Image: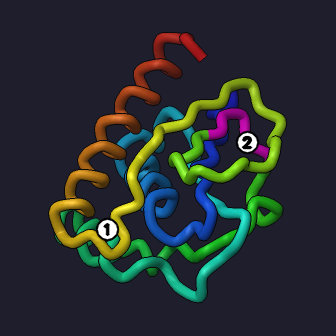
Amino acid sequence: MNKPKVAFICVHNSCRSQIAEALGRYLASEVFESYSAGTQTKPQINQDAVKYVKQLYDIDMEKAQYSKLIADIPSPDIVITMGCNVSCPILPCIYREDWGLIDPIGKGEDAFLETIKAIHRRILELKDKILENRI
């Protein structure tokens, strides 16, 4: 069976969704394919997100990732929204979940580390749901 495609969606696709794409690839690539996208883009990934993910996981997000629109990624099987407090476009999928994560931009190191830790935990929970056929 093909691995499900998971799309992590946020407004600008520059921070939380990018972190989720990187950690999805790092922690669960044997279970699902990870993509991230937004309804708008930024010229580059948030530099604090890049710094802390590099520090914690030795992953250089800027090497393999860039800010993308929803139209730029394959049709997802699973859509995860980050909690952007905007109405996301309807994407056909078999499962949808909102993680309700606070945007750490401009809030300092502790906020970034807390967000990254929450994404790490949720990636592992999503991986388990898929492995246990709960999705």
> Residue flagged by tag 2: what amino acid is it?
Pro
Q: Is residue 99 left or right of residue 117?
A: right
Say which residue appears at 59% left-offset and 88% top-offset.
43
* Residue 59, numbered circle: 1
Q: Does the stretch in magenta take in 36? A: no
Residue 70 % position (x, y): 75, 60
In the displayed structure, 126 sits above or below 50; it is above
Whether residue 76 appears in magenta in the rendering, the answer is: yes
Residue 15 in percent (x, y) is at 45, 67
Most foreground residue, 126 or 12? 12
Q: Residue at x 83, y 36 (%)?
A: 92
The range drawn in magenta is: 75-79
| Quarter holding residue 56 | bottom left
The residue positioned 57% from the left and 76% from the top of the image is 66
Q: Mark 2, residues whose alpha carbon is within 10 Å: few (<14), some, or many (≥20)?
A: many
Q: Quadrant of the C terminus?
A: top right
CA gap, disc 1 to disc 2? 24 Å
Say above or below: 48 vs 111. Answer: below
Which three-letter amino acid code belongs to the residue tagged 1?
Answer: Ile
Dot 1: element = loop
Q: Main secondary structure of the magenta part?
A: loop
| Image quarter of residue 54 | bottom left
Circle 2 is placed at which residue position? 76
Which residue is most to the front? 85
- The structure's colour scheme is rainbow
Residue neighbourhood size for the residue with mark 1, other residues' Cα within 10 Å, grouped as few (<14), some (14–19), many (≥20): some
Picture residue at 58% right of the left edge, 31% below the top: 97
State whether residue 81 is above or below residue 124: below
Q: Position of residue 63 (x, y in %)?
A: 45, 79
